[in-house]
């Protein structure tokens, strides 16, 4: 089955700096990669996703890049703000078939210091 | 509109007790997923429903875990004879289309289960 590794487990940055979180996956058939943000005690919320037919996607201060050959994808947050502090999870799935299992990484605790 | 809701939000159970966790998905969503999230970990897949059909239960840790969605809307996750290792947050998610199509999964707030 799919295995998703996420690094780093914790990340501390100064407000205004950029933050990068990296994930690798094992199943070359995976083709959909969402990122979720989870604040303490709250539900995971989708912040951005990417499909395997594109290499990069951007939404304001958030971007995701995908390297299918290397089987890794990354989340980039620019101009970080204290409200970006949360746990971020990457995930992967081989969608379109009979597989329904979204596999998550272990999460990255991002702290943005004012 | 209303998002995914779950109840109870918190549950304390004595070891050996049975518990039932409820999920109300977004109205009209075809797919419903249950995940288990241990402290400091990412959610781990438990089971998947497409309408009322349970198409994948490969993630259920043991036969003490049982899930149902009899009318294709509300779902219940039941844990029999709870053990301490069952302590976790149980998340429910729904999505509009049939699962596996890479559509956004909308999560509920979770039920935090503590087994003493």
Image: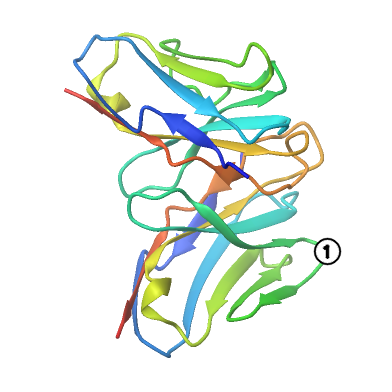
Left/right placement of residue A76 relative to residue A100 reads left
Q: Residue at x 38, y 58 (%)?
A: A39
Classify A47 as above or below B25. below
Query: In the orientation shown, which residue stands out farthest toward the left?
Result: B116
Chain letter for the residue marked with disc 1 in the picture: A
Q: Position of residue A74 (x, y in %)?
A: 58, 71
Left/right placement of residue A18 relative to residue A29 reads left
Quadrant in the rendering for residue A95:
top right
Q: Which image quarter is the N terminus of chain B in?
A: top right
Total count of labels: 1
Quadrant in the rendering for residue A84:
bottom left
Q: Nearer the viewer, residue A59 or A97?
A: A59
Q: Residue at x 48, y 51 (%)?
A: A44
Q: Nearer the viewer, residue B75 or A54?
A: B75
Q: Which image quarter is the C terminus of chain B in?
A: top left
Classify B22 as above or below A38. above
> What colour-coding does the image apply?
rainbow
Q: Residue at x 37, y 70 (%)?
A: A85
Query: In the orientation shown, which residue stands out farthest toward the bottom?
Result: A16
Task: Classify 10 Å Cα crowding around label 1: few (below 14), some (14-19), many (20 and above).
Answer: few
Q: Position of residue A7 (x, y in %)?
A: 44, 66
Q: Secondary structure at mark 1?
A: loop
Q: Position of residue A78 (x, y in %)?
A: 52, 85
Q: Position of residue B92 (x, y in %)?
A: 52, 34
Classify B97 as above or below A93. above
In the picture of the structure, the residue carrying the numbered disc 1 is: A53
């Amino acid at each position: 089955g799919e295995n998703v590794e996420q690094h780093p487990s914790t990340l501390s940055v100064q407000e205004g700096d950029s933050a990068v979180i990296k994930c690798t996956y094992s199943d070359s058939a995976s083709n959909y990669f969402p990122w979720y943000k989870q604040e303490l005690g709250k539900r995971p919320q989708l912040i951005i996703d990417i499909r395997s037919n594109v290499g990069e996607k951007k939404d304001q201060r958030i971007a995701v890049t995908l390297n299918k050959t290397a089987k890794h994808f990354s989340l980039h947050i620019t101009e970080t703000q204290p409200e970006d502090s949360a746990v971020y999870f990457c995930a992967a799935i081989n969608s379109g078939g009979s597989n329904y299992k979204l596999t998550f990484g272990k999460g990255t605790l991002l702290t943005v210091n004012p | 509109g209303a998002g995914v809701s779950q109840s109870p939000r918190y549950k304390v159970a004595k070891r050996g007790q049975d518990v039932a966790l409820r999920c109300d998905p977004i109205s009209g969503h075809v797919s419903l997923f249950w995940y288990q999230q241990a402290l400091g970990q990412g959610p781990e897949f438990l089971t998947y429903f497409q309408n009322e059909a349970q198409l994948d239960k490969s993630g259920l840790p043991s036969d003490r875990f049982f899930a149902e969605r009899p009318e294709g809307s509300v779902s219940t996750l039941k844990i029999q004879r709870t053990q301490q290792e069952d302590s976790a947050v149980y998340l429910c998610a729904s999505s509009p289309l049939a699962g596996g199509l890479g559509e956004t999964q909308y999560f509920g707030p979770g039920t935090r289960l503590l087994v003493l």
